[in-house]
Image (cartoon, rainbow, N blue to C red):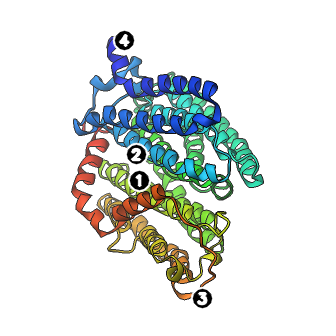
């Protein structure tokens, strides 16, 4: 494939790179006063990137025609599905961030630039066809994320979350690099296709260790247990728009990368990594559910909820089938909508001084003082719990269905039983809002943009979301098929 063709396939990444550099110059000249303009332009760039990416998904792009730069980059339908979710999540983050940081007088022109470059790294991650491209994309995303986590320099919690994220993220990168070096040493290649072919004849002890270390490094990025320890502190300490970004775009990119590595690099030896994935899945479900029970901070509760939901998503990966991969993508898309609704609702929780309200006990009687916010928050809680007829139920249903079809009935049964535990802490929040005496803490007025986003995301996870199930299942099927071009 010629160089021009490779450039054409990487147009969204090139656009993000060039736009980021141009906006960086505007930030240098205009200073923080230009932050609103830069945010608007960044959202426009993300929109254009989404438009450029969408045809690959609708056209079911796969095979040799989507390979760029000698196999380093793959612009297939799977990458397009993940990128659309990443760009949408990044756009939402930029929309909600401006007013949030303006109230704290902490908005800087660098914020939208960091989101753009993080999105660039995420796009490279989900399109990676080689271990080297994987690591470059991962580090580009991580370096921007460390700064984003500690963006509120006057807030000790934000600085602490950034430091913890950096230290533990560096440890995870080291684990991942060690696994990559072992994999290269025992297969002789860094290409996903080459690794797959080299392992087809059998898995040596060294290659097995390499596989385990690679999966362990990626497990940190998706906050799967037992590598979840950073998540509650970072979610709580980071500014809420940044937490929204981590819960949506970062989660999509890391899960997308894990799926691609599992199927394309280690797909010839699924039995070797299925055990690891099943262990991480069940542990994440249990730790996420039990860890959330004693939380009194809504953002920490959402952090444990993310760990819990990652466990359910990994059930789809554990099946090692196309149906399981498709179910994962459906669940991820629904989870993004639920997370956006949840964190935008949190952004609307402000006291009379305009300060963020995060303590669950302060939400007592919210249904009487702020009924619409309480209703939206209750919808998010019920949807995350997987209670029908809300759309979150569909995500769990398709994942459990894929497990049953793959004859993993015991895994599905354990997952269903564990989801009942998770329902407890979701219902606790609803109980506080609807049945406790009003604390009358939430008094501040919300931004119009936040309200609009909350309405749209709430509609997406409401029973109206089922109207889009056919389209979502079809697109997820297209994306999953790109990982199985032969089957």
Labels 4 and 3: the sequence-earlier one: 4
- Residues tagged 3 and 1 counted as in contact (Cβ below 8 A): no
Distance Cα–Cα, label 2 vs label 1:
9 Å
Q: Which secondary structure lies at badge 3?
A: loop
Kindly tell me whether residue 473 is visible in this rendering.
Answer: yes
Looking at the rendered image, the disc whose residue lies closer to the viewer, 2 or 1, is 2
x and y, in percent, of residue 262 in the image: 44, 41
- Left or right of 278 on screen, residue 301: right
Q: Which secondary structure lies at badge 1?
A: helix
Q: Which residue is mark 4?
A: 3
Labels 2 and 1: the sequence-earlier one: 2
Q: Which residue is mark 1?
A: 332
x and y, in percent, of residue 414 in the image: 45, 70
Q: Which residue is mark 3?
A: 437
Q: Quadrant of residue 197?
A: top left
Distance Cα–Cα, label 2 vs label 4:
28 Å
Quadrant in which the N terminus is drawn: top left
């Amino acid at each position: 494939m010629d160089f021009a063709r490779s450039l054409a396939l990487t147009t969204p990444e090139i656009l993000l790179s060039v736009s980021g550099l141009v906006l960086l110059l505007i930030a240098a000249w205009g200073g923080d006063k230009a932050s609103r303009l830069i945010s608007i332009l960044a959202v426009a760039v993300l929109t254009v990137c989404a438009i450029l990416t969408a045809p690959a998904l609708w056209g079911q792009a796969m095979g040799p025609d989507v390979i760029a730069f000698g196999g380093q980059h793959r612009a297939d339908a799977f990458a397009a599905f993940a990128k659309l979710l990443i760009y949408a999540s990044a756009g939402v983050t930029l929309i909600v961030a401006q007013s949030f940081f303006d109230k704290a007088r902490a908005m800087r022109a660098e914020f939208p630039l960091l989101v753009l470059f993080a999105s660039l790294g995420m796009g490279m991650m989900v399109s990676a066809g080689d271990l080297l491209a994987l690591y470059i994309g991962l580090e580009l995303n991580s370096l921007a994320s460390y700064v984003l986590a500690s963006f509120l320099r006057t807030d000790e919690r934000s600085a602490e979350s950034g430091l913890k994220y950096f230290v533990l993220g560096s440890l995870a990168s080291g684990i991942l690099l060690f696994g990559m070096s072992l994999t290269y040493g025992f297969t002789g290649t860094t290409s996903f296709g080459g690794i797959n072919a080299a392992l087809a004849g059998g898995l040596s002890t060294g290659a097995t260790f390499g596989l385990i270390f690679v999966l362990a490094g990626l497990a940190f990025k998706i906050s799967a247990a037992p590598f979840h320890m950073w998540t509650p502190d970072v979610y709580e300490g980071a500014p809420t728009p940044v937490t929204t970004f981590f819960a949506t775009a970062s989660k999509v990119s890391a899960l997308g990368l894990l799926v691609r590595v599992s199927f394309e690099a280690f797909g010839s030896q699924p039995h070797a990594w299925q055990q690891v994935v099943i262990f991480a899945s069940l542990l994440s479900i249990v730790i996420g559910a039990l860890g959330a029970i004693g939380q009194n901070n809504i953002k920490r509760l959402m952090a444990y909820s993310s760990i819990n939901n990652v466990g359910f998503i990994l059930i789809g990966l554990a099946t090692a089938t196309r149906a399981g991969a498709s179910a994962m993508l459906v669940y991820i898309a629904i989870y993004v909508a639920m997370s956006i609704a949840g964190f935008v609702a949190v952004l609307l929780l402000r006291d009379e001084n305009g300060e963020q309200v995060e303590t669950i006990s302060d939400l007592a009687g919210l249904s009487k003082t702020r009924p619409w916010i309480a209703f939206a928050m209750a919808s998010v809680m019920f949807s995350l719990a997987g209670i029908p007829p809300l759309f979150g139920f569909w995500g769990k249903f398709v994942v459990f269905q894929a497990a049953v079809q793959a004859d993993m009935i015991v895994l599905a049964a354990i997952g269903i039983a564990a989801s009942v535990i998770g329902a407890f802490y979701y219902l606790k929040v609803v109980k506080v809002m609807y049945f406790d005496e009003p604390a009358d803490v939430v008094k501040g007025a919300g931004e119009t943009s936040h309200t609009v986003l909350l309405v749209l995301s709430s509609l997406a996870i409401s029973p109206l979301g089922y109207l889009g199930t056919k389209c979502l299942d079809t697109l997820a099927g297209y994306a999953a098929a790109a990982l199985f071009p032969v089957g």
